[in-house]
Amino acid sequence: MPISMDQVRSLPDFQTAYQWSLSIPNPPTGMDWAPVELRCISTTTPNRSVDPMEVTIRGHRVRQAGMATYAGDITLTFVETVDATVLEFFNAWQDLVWQTETGIQAPRAEYMTTVILTMLDGRGNPTQKYTLFDVYPNGPIDAGELSGETGDVVRPSVTLSYTYYRWEKAA
């Protein structure tokens, strides 16, 4: 069935992909998230799927929902400044997870934290929120491509691991 212009016009404002915030309410000890968050230019969103269970009984096959599986990773991309704010933050955080020279690892309570990704409307009001639990940097801290052929900035990216997340619609 075709839709009408009036139906499209009756929809609420569309959620934009550029109005969001990413916060770490309790960053690892001694680390300041605010100057790093300002440099964050993109993030993937967390997701999960429900694994199917398939049962065959005497030639009849049925499927039903099984366990939920969380993807477990999001990737953040930043613009870096000459003071190396982003790379310093994530290298220090990753050193809490594992110190290469000594093999020392901080207790989980010291390096795992909560991350909140909030989608915003045109006035900056929250519309929905993802709260990610047990977050730490698990992937390589990639400084991005360096090239003498462009006038672009350095765009480091980092992968954060999480155990699970909670999604909420703003009130």
Image (cartoon, grey):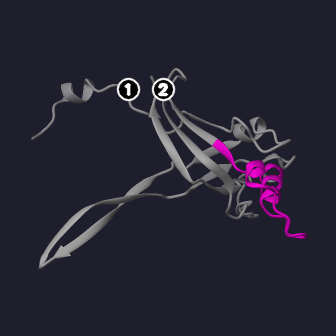
* Above or below for 78 versus 24: below
The structure residue drawn at horizontal position 70% and vertical position 39%, both measured from the top left corner, is 37
Return the disc, 1 or 2, that comes first in the chain's sequence: 1
| Disc 2 crowd, CA 10 A, few/some/many (<14, 14-19, 20+) | some
**Dot 1, crowdedness within 10 Å: few (<14), some or many (≥20)?**
few
Residue found at the far left of this picture? 1
Q: Residue at x 54, y 33 (%)?
A: 19
- Furthest residue to the bottom? 59
- In the rendered image, residue 26, in percent from the top left (x then y), is placed at 73, 37
Point out residue 93 in the picture as x, y percentages from the top left corner: 79, 53
Badge 2 element = loop
Query: Between 43 and 53, which is closer to the camera in this rendering?
Result: 53
Mark 1 sits on what residue? 13
Q: Residue at x 9, y 41 (%)?
A: 1
Asked whether residue 110 is drawn in magenta, I would say yes
Quadrant the C terminus occupies = top left
The region drawn magenta spans 88-114
Residue at 82% across, 46% down? 85
Q: Position of residue 83 (x, y in %)?
A: 87, 46
Q: What residue type is disc 1 on?
A: Asp
Q: Give coordinates of residue 51: x percent, y percent.
A: 36, 63
Is 93 contained in the magenta span?
A: yes
Between 31 and 109, the residue placed more toward the observer is: 109
Residue flagged by tag 2: what amino acid is it?
Asp
Whether residue 121 is situated above or below residue 145 in the rendered picture: above
Instruction: Identify residue for label 2.
Output: 121
Residue 116 in the figure: left or right of residue 1: right
Report, in whole angstroms, how far the alpha carbon at label 1 lies from the one at label 2: 8 Å
Asked if marks 1 and 2 touch (Cβ < 8 Å), the reply is yes
Position of 118 with respect to 57 (left or right) is: right
Q: Is 38 rendered above or below residue 113?
A: above
